[in-house]
Image (cartoon, rainbow, N blue to C red):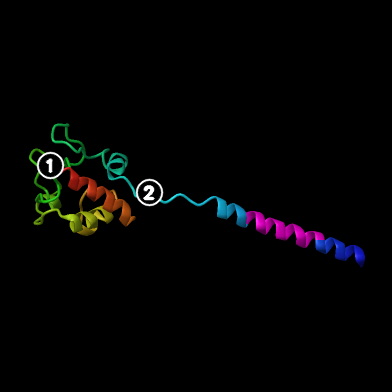
Amino acid sequence: MGELLKMRAVVLGLCTAVVLVVRAADAQMPLPAAKPPDGATLFKQQCAVCHTSSLSEPMRQGPPLVRIVGRTAGKVEGFHYSDGLANADFTWDESRLDAWLANPQAVIPGVVMAYRQAKPETRAAIITYLKELN
């Protein structure tokens, strides 16, 4: 019986030591603060495959997005829009862009754009970048 008590004491001591080491490690290594997403980088990664941010670049699958905030939807000279966008009757603002990036087909059924961004912070960063292009 004495041997069993010694073994329990050793195991209990080891468990206590592990807990103390883990707590000490947590106290010594704070996590870095999360960086907000960078809109320019996100645009390059997620949007630039289909869109340019300059009128001087050749058009891609989507229209250039320079000066999109405040622009009438479906109205870039020289770009062929789907019927839904060509007939759209609204101006792009932050709210409309946010809804569009979340789900383009919910804004205008039948549009070709397949991109969807579920994260509000990512959409906000991209929209902030697009506003800078105005």
On the rendered structure, is 121 left or right of 129?
Answer: right
Label 2 vs 1, first from the N-terminus: 2
Question: Which is more foreground, mark 2 or mark 1?
Answer: 2
Q: Nearer the viewer, residue 55 or 88?
A: 55
Label 2 environment density (alpha carbons within 10 Å; few <14, some 14–19, many ≥20): few
Front-most of residues 49 and 129: 129
In the rendered view of the protein, which quadrant contains the C terminus? top left
Quadrant for the N terminus, please.
bottom right
Identify residue type, mark 1: His
Label 2 to label 1, Cα distance in Å? 38 Å
Give, as a three-letter code, the residue at label 2. Answer: Lys
Please identify the quarter of the rendering in which residue 63 is found: top left
Does residue 60 appear in this view? Answer: yes
Residue ID for mark 1: 80
Position in image of residue 115 (x %, y %): 29, 48
State which quadrant residue 18 falls in. Answer: bottom right
User: Where residue 54 sits: x, y (%)?
Assistant: 16, 36
Q: For the point 12% across and 42% down, which residue is it? A: 80
Seen at 33% across and 48% down, the residue is 37
Q: Is residue 17 magenta?
A: yes
Percent position of residue 127, x then y: 23, 50
**SS at mark 1?**
loop
Asked if residue 85 lies left or right of residue 99, the reply is: left
Q: Which residues are magenta?
A: 10-22
Question: What is the crowding at mark 1: few (fewer than 14 residues within 10 Å), some, or many (at least 20)?
Answer: some
Which residue appears farthest toward the bottom when viewing the image?
1
Image side of residue 123 versus residue 20, left or right = left
Residue 66: which quarter of the image?
A: top left
Q: Which mark is residue 35?
A: 2
